[in-house]
């Protein structure tokens, strides 16, 4: 015979567990519970804060051309580049003319990928560097040496992106701006005092905690070529000064990027975690997600 009292207790606990789960997941839904504008008046782009047809129409009329620079070096080329290119071909700036700048230390290993009409692939060779930290940090130099000289005459806006990401839905013209920064989804729900800003005052990437507003991800940043030239020049200068002092910022080029965006030039547009999703947040409308990471093997 069923023990009704025990059954009721079990049902109650199941109900309580379900309710707690719903409350937990709802607490991680970022929009519309979070602001859609920064303290200095720049928009934070979430799905639902823009009219996609209207912003696309404006850029169609202008004939806007958008570029992506992506670094595919060492094992990252064979592991991540094809999914990145295939997904960009499908979801990145649909309807607009685009140029994909693939910077690699092994052009002969480039895969053949069929791209849509209006999307052009440009392959650029960069030096071989033994340390992954230097590969990451010196992309600021490679952007200036290899990408910008072409992009300044070919595109109106350029995004600089990591290759170990995949587009999963429309990544459109609502993201375009003079200087665009990406909120780091891994830090999005943290308090400012928990941000991993560089805290060693010997480093040029040092940020006093009270000076920062957000923590930005270096896997996505963009804008016009003049604004990106200023950003990369400042970050590269800081990286080289640190090297002379034998200091290395805690998160390398990302630390220098955060210092620049906090202390030198505030972004004109900020992208919500939807545009670079690491799956730690529950988001309704992710546009791009991190690929599965395997740093131990990929960075050898």
Image (cartoon, rainbow, N blue to C red):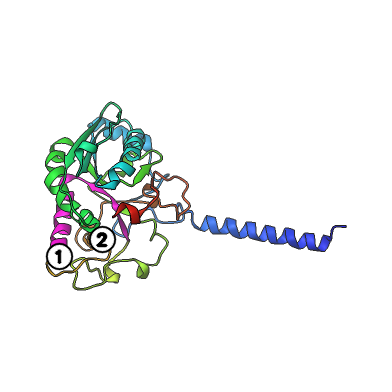
Q: Which residues are magenta?
A: 215-241
Q: Is residue 156 visible?
A: no
The quadrant where residue 92 appears: top left
Q: Main secondary structure of the magenta part?
A: helix
Element marked by disc 2: helix
Q: Is residue 258 left or right of residue 9?
A: left
228 within the magenta span: yes
Number of the front mark, 2 or 1 = 1
Q: Nearer the viewer, residue 284 or 51?
A: 284
Q: Dividing the image into 4 quarters, which one contains the C terminus? A: bottom left
297 within the magenta span: no
The structure residue drawn at horizontal position 23% and vertical position 65%, both measured from the top left corner, is: 249
According to the picture, the residue beneath numbered tag 1 turns out to be 243
Dot 2 or dot 1: first in sequence order is 1
The structure residue drawn at horizontal position 17% and vertical position 47%, both measured from the top left corner, is: 143
Q: Badge 2: how crowded within 10 Å, few (<14), some, or many (20+)?
A: many
The quadrant where residue 15 appears: bottom right
Q: Badge 1: how crowded within 10 Å, few (<14), some, or many (20+)?
A: few
The structure residue drawn at horizontal position 36% and vertical position 49%, both measured from the top left corner, is: 276
Element marked by disc 1: helix
Q: Nearer the viewer, residue 235 or 137?
A: 137
Q: Is residue 234 visible?
A: yes
In this view, 188 is above or below 103: below
The quadrant where residue 112 appears: top left
The count of marks equals 2
| Residue 28 place in picture, x, y as percent | 49, 56
| Residue 61 place in picture, x, y as percent | 26, 30
According to the picture, the residue beneath numbered tag 2 turns out to be 258
Q: Nearer the viewer, residue 42 or 205?
A: 205
């Amino acid at each position: 015979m069923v023990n009704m009292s025990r059954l009721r207790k079990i049902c109650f606990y199941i109900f309580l567990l379900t309710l707690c789960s719903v409350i937990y997941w709802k607490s991680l839904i970022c929009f519309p519970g979070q602001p859609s504008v920064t303290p200095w008046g720049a928009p934070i782009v979430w799905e639902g804060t823009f009219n996609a047809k209207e912003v696309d129409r404006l850029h169609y009329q202008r004939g806007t051309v958008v570029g992506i620079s992506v670094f595919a070096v060492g094992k990252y080329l064979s592991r991540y580049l094809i999914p990145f290119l295939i997904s960009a071909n499908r979801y990145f700036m649909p309807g607009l003319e685009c140029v994909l700048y693939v910077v690699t230390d092994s052009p002969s290993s480039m895969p053949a990928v069929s791209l849509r009409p209006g999307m052009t692939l440009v392959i650029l060779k960069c030096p071989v560097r033994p340390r992954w930290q230097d590969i990451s940090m010196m992309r600021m130099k490679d952007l200036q040496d290899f990408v910008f000289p072409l992009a300044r005459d070919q595109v109106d806006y350029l995004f600089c992106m990591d290759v170990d990401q995949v587009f999963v839905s429309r990544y459109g013209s609502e993201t375009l701006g003079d200087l665009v920064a990406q909120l780091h989804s891994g830090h999005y729900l943290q308090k400012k005092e928990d941000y991993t800003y560089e805290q060693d005052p010997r480093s040029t990437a040092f940020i006093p905690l009270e000076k920062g507003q957000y923590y930005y991800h270096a896997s996505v940043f963009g804008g016009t070529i003049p604004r990106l030239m200023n950003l990369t020049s400042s970050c590269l200068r800081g990286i080289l000064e640190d090297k002379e002092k034998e200091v290395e910022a805690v998160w390398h080029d990302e630390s220098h990027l955060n210092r620049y965006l906090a202390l030198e030039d505030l972004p004109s547009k900020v992208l919500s975690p939807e545009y670079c999703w690491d799956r730690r947040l529950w988001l309704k409308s992710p546009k791009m997600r991190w690929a599965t990471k395997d740093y131990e093997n990929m960075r050898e």
